[in-house]
Amino acid sequence: EVQLVESGGGLVQPGGSLRLSCAASGFAFSSNWMHWVRQAPGKGLMWVSGMNGDGSLTNYADSVKGRFTSSRDNAKNTFYLEMNSLRPEDTAVYYCVRSLSGDSDYWGRGTLVTVSS
Amino acid sequence: DIVMTQSPLSLPVTPGEPASISCRSSQSLLHSNGYNYLNWYLQKPGQSPQLLIFLGSRRASGVPDRFSGSGSGTDFTLKISRVEAEDVGVYYCLQPLQVPLTFGGGTKVEIK
């Protein structure tokens, strides 16, 4: 069974840092693109970042470029999002997503990040 | 960036009746391989989004056949042939063709 379990969310002050983790199981992790998608409270979906299977290609939304860094450890089947210089507008549920292309699309349950003083 | 525009914003529906949602993109989503790179998702209340349709018209595994996707280029439509109570939630379109990937603003479907 495919599982994606996010962790690491919480309350952080503006300007602070947080590292999210996504533990994957039930599929060939290293063969899949992985993405982070976020959803601000009561709002729509926004793609944040994506990384290919071997970690050689990473893309970011302009609003997080230079502040957020995606990485992956294929030996541990884990996908990460390092978030620095956090702003109140980064407050959202962050979803870990497999693929976003084709029928292998799968979403985790998300982890809430709150940026507030 | 490719801008995705959904309509309507809200869609009250009657169980058993059909429903239709539109998604328009600011650039063509038709790849040279002949596929349209357009996904549809449903986010039920309190849940993560779930894939309904990919490549414009292909139903994802386990999705009931009352859901269908159509369109090409910049104009796409999601149709529900007969709405059921479990279909309520917010529907989103997504273009995975070009970075940054972009979602439509969402269409909230609720029972009348």
Image (cartoon, rainbow, N blue to C red):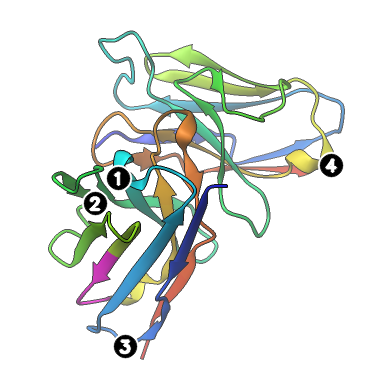
Q: Distance between the residues labelled 1 and 2?
A: 23 Å
Q: Which of marks 2 and 3 is nearer the N terminus?
A: 3
| Residue B45 falls in image quadrant | bottom right
Q: Where residue A117 appears, x then y in whole percent?
A: 36, 91
- Disc 1 crowd rating (10 Å Cα; few below 14, some 14-19, many 20+) is some
Badge 3: chain ID: A
Q: Where residue B74 appears, x then y in whole percent?
A: 38, 19
Relative vertical location of residue A106 with respect to residue A65 in this rendering, above or below: above
Q: Which of marks 3 and 1 is nearer the N terminus?
A: 3
Element under disc 3 = loop
| Residue B42 falls in image quadrant | top right
Badge 2: chain ID: A
Q: How far apart are marks 3 and 1 (CA)?
A: 34 Å
Viewport quadrant of the N terminus of chain B: top left
Front-most of residues B53 and A42 = B53
Q: Where residue B11 appears, x then y in whole percent?
A: 69, 38
Front-most of residues A63 and A25 = A25
Label annotation for residue A30: 1
Query: Going 34% across and 49% down the picture, which residue do you hit?
Result: A35
Relative vertical location of residue B24 with respect to residue A113 in this rendering, above or below: above
- The residue stretch that appears in magenta: A81-86
On whether residue A56 falls in the magenta region, the answer is no
Q: Name the residue under label 3.
A: A13
Label 4–label 3 contact, CB within 8 A: no
Amino acid under disc 2: Ala
Q: Which residue lies furthest to the bottom in this view?
A: A117
Element under disc 1 = helix
